[in-house]
Amino acid sequence: MLMGDHQFVTFADFSIWVSGYVSLVLIFAMFGTPDAGYNIQEMKSPSSQLHNAAIFPSPAFLWRFKVLLFMIWGISCCKIGWDSVMRMSADLRNLFLYEVFLYYNPLLVVTLMVWLWGVNLWVFSQSNVGYAKIFDLDQNHLTHKEIWKCSTWMTIIVPTSITAYLYFYSSGNVSLAALQPVSLYIAVAMVLISPFDIFYLSSRYFLLRTLWRIALPLQAISFPDFFLADILTSMAKVFSDLERSVCRMVRRQVATIAWLEADSVCGSHSIAIPLVLVFPYLCRLFQCLRQFKDTKEKTTLFNALKYSTAVPVIFLSALKYHVFPDRWTNFYSPLWLLSSVVNSLYSFYWDIARDWDLSGFSRIFKFSRSSMLSNMFYGRKWVYFWVIGSNLVLRCTWTYKLSSHLRHNYLTVFTITALEILRRFQWIFFRVENEWNKISRSSLDQLLPMTGIRAEEEMLLETNNHIV
């Protein structure tokens, strides 16, 4: 489909984009490849140091050069993308941008999550929270620097693919435009499942194994299992857009108008949308049931009930496109609103009282001295007030994303999805710290007698043992 002025991509245009990708490869090389390393013994020898000093520029110069290249790349992408969008006809421009959003929203959200996870690890490394012990990681686990290196790659590759898609589509070369998201998704999948010892093989294996354990909770639930499953519930919109994107790629509807039919297999009224949205919540629910089977703790059943409250929110919303309007307005819409309120408030309570163990705000008001355990934000009451207030607001707005009938404003949906990722980002700090406190208390119980101070802290931090 040609939009705006009918232009054709010349060999010179294509050469420009090939040279652009080559330039990006050079930028990647300068940022460092994921498994790049150096021979430490050779670097330590005096002769090697003199030789390297004579050949390689100073680190400060390299950093400035990288920043300059990054700025040139960013400005180029913005300029090319803006010109490409402005070349399209105004009546179809918004529909086209919605399609671009559908294909690239999952990758953009994942990129944001990876950046923030690096920040989480950096904060943990600066405090006394032993996250490696919590997640049962070996000494080869990725540090925050390696996580940020991966997110840097993603930050460069995804916007470059978006720019190429905009350019080729607006220029009339639909086949090359359609190739951009398809090739990117294939490349990401190949990197994840690659059996070769590149791109952090052990970490990729750990991630894939954990995802498999989440999808089929047939074994005892570990902390990484339910921790990652909780994060996946915040990325339900990612899975929904990913399903529709793959559906259109398989049916060769990329960069076409076939997807505009809402009742089509890959349309916005597809029954697959609520099924994919509810999948992370069902996985988490089954984990809680498995935990109850193993521990017989009734609290896990109440946790399972929390995840079950998301099911009516999702499916009642999807019913709007399959019932008469009067029926929706008078019956299903009030039910959807009620279920949304129940889900938001129940989830908020569980975050505060169970996941973070802040019931009664004991950490804010009752500690007269710093705890022997980890308290990353001890003495900063405003942090707790901010986290509690923002968590309540974002828990309520997150219902917007779970509702199929409210998802047509893609800019609003992307904003709310990004805010949910930020809510999950701050949730991680307190959830991991709470788990570390449990491990620390268990160790202290074996090493120290119960003193007066110990008894006071035990009363204030009393919580259930490893409730998921």
Image (cartoon, rainbow, N blue to C red):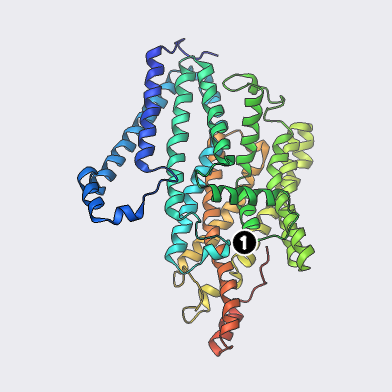
Towards the viewer: 97 or 214: 214
Mark yes or no: residue 194 visible. yes
Across and down, in percent, residue 344 comes to 65, 54
Towards the viewer: 20 or 258: 20
Towards the viewer: 96 or 327: 96
Crowding at label 1, few (<14), some or many (≥20) Cα neighbours within 10 Å?
many
Quarter of the image where one finds residue 431: bottom right
Q: Amino acid at mark 1?
A: Asp
Q: Is residue 122 left or right of residue 30?
A: right
Which quarter shows the C terminus?
bottom right
Q: Is residue 89 left or right of residue 41?
A: right
Q: Is residue 286 left or right of residue 87?
A: right
Kindly identify the residue that appears in the image at 58 percent across and 62 percent down.
136
Towards the viewer: 180 or 172: 180
Mark count = 1
Q: Which residue was labeled with disc 1?
A: 351
Kindly identify the residue that appears in the image at 56 percent across and 24 percent down.
95
Look at the numbered disc 1 and give the secondary structure of its residue: helix
Across and down, in percent, residue 298 comes to 77, 67
In the rendered image of this protein, does residue 187 appear above or below residue 423? above
In the rendered image of this protein, does residue 172 appear above or below residue 166? above
Across and down, in percent, residue 439 comes to 59, 72
Which quarter shows the N terminus?
top right
Mark yes or no: residue 430 visible. no
Kindly identify the residue that appears in the image at 48 percent across and 24 percent down.
165
Across and down, in percent, residue 30 comes to 34, 40
